[in-house]
Structures are given as C-alpha cells and as structure tokens.
Image (spheres, rainbow, N blue to C red):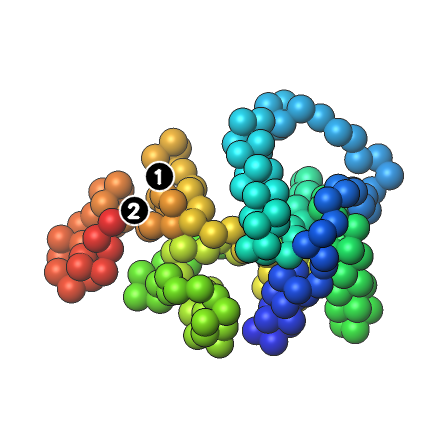
Amino acid sequence: MRFLLYIFFLILIFGCSSKTNQISKSNTDSNFKNVSPESVGISSDRLNRIDKYFKKSISENIIPGAVTLIIKDGKIEGFEGDNETIKNVEKHYQKISKMFNISKNIVDSWHAGIHPGTYYNKPIEENPDRWSNTIFGSPKYLHFHTCGDYPPGEICWMIENPSITIQDIPLWENGNLMLKNFKETRSLLEKWVDLKKLFVN
C-alpha cells in the first residue's frame, strides 16, 4: 500500500504540465449532473478560494498541476483538472484495478490520524520517505481509501489540515486533534501529563 501511495503521489505531482490551463472533467457515471455546491452542503466561497489557491500555485510553478476527486454516495464520479493530469490519474486507476481485479470507483472508508508525535512540517520533497512513513498516523492528514471494496483499498487521497466536527463540535481542527473539546478525551489529558504535552494546540 505504501509503495502504491508513493507512486500515485509522484504521478499527481509530476505527471502533468504546469503550462496547461484548460480544465476538463472526466465522469465515470453518465448520469452525473452538475449542481450548486450549496445544494449538497458545500460552500461556493470556500471552493472558489481553493480554486484560486491552486491556480496561483500553478502559475507560480509551485506545483505542476492539480486534480479534484468527485465523490458521490461512496463512489468516484469523476475528476476535474487539466487534461494531462486526469489522463495520468485515470491510467493509474485502470492499472491498479486491473492488476488486482477490483472496482476502481469505490471509496471504501476514510480516517484521520491520531498521533501528534508524527507531525512533519518540512517540505515533502525534502524527505519523502519520512513523510510517507508517518502520514497515516498524523492528525494533519485525512485519508480517503479508494479503488477496491475492502479496507484500506489500493489508492489513497489525502486532505491536509482537515477540520471534522462531531455534532458541531470540532474533533479535528485545521489538522489538530482537539481532545480537550470532549469530556471523555479531556479526562485522558488530565490523567496523563506527558500525553497532554503532545496535544498542545
């Protein structure tokens, strides 16, 4: 799994041209329809800010390109991004699904890390081995397991610095596990002083 993740990461980062500005969409479901973000509980303003961030990063050659994964009801509906990146991502999905004879469009599960001792805040390219070996335990990342109807799947997508709420209370906030926000976990911090030091937010 780690090897496949690393290969996929390289495809996303290096598999496209930074000069490509055309945005295209690849749909795996012919019944997929465009709807307003708000109708499915997503903020248009936040999506626009994300779009501007990636366009700026691409124009400044910070990253060569970007692709967005579209998920609906536990299945991958398609990808958005520049043509070359989408082509490479789809090629990788096809290869892995054929290799293991599995469904490529399944999103099996998701989780975020819980070990604050695995934080790695340096650039990924400075030490990709350390980054890839600690990322699954780090609260800084949320992982979507895809390609295969079993955990953990064969291809993983990551969200950096996620915010996750439980009944409107942040359990993760900008990549920090907020144990102090819940009575049950707050008592653990009070009992174990050394543990509390790791979770200083």
Residue name at image x 38 percent, y 45 percent: 174
Q: Which amino acid does label 2 sit on?
A: Met
**Residue drawn at point x = 63 percent, y = 23 percent:** 39
Sequence-wise, the earlier of marks 2 and 1 is 1
Q: Nearer the viewer, residue 149 or 198?
A: 198
In the image, taking residue 107 as reference, residue 110 lies left or right, namely left
- Which amino acid type is marked by label 1? Pro
- Which residue: 79% across, 50% down? 83
Q: Where is residue 190 in the image (x, y as percent from the top left)?
A: 13, 53
Query: What residue did someone put label 1 on?
Result: 170
Q: Do the residues labelled 2 and 1 touch (CB within 8 Å)?
A: yes
Residue 6 visible in the current orientation: yes
- Residue 62 vs 183, above or below: the answer is below
Is 98 displayed left or right of 21 in the figure? right
Q: How far apart are marks 2 and 1 (CA)?
A: 7 Å
Q: Residue 23, image x and y in percent?
A: 75, 42
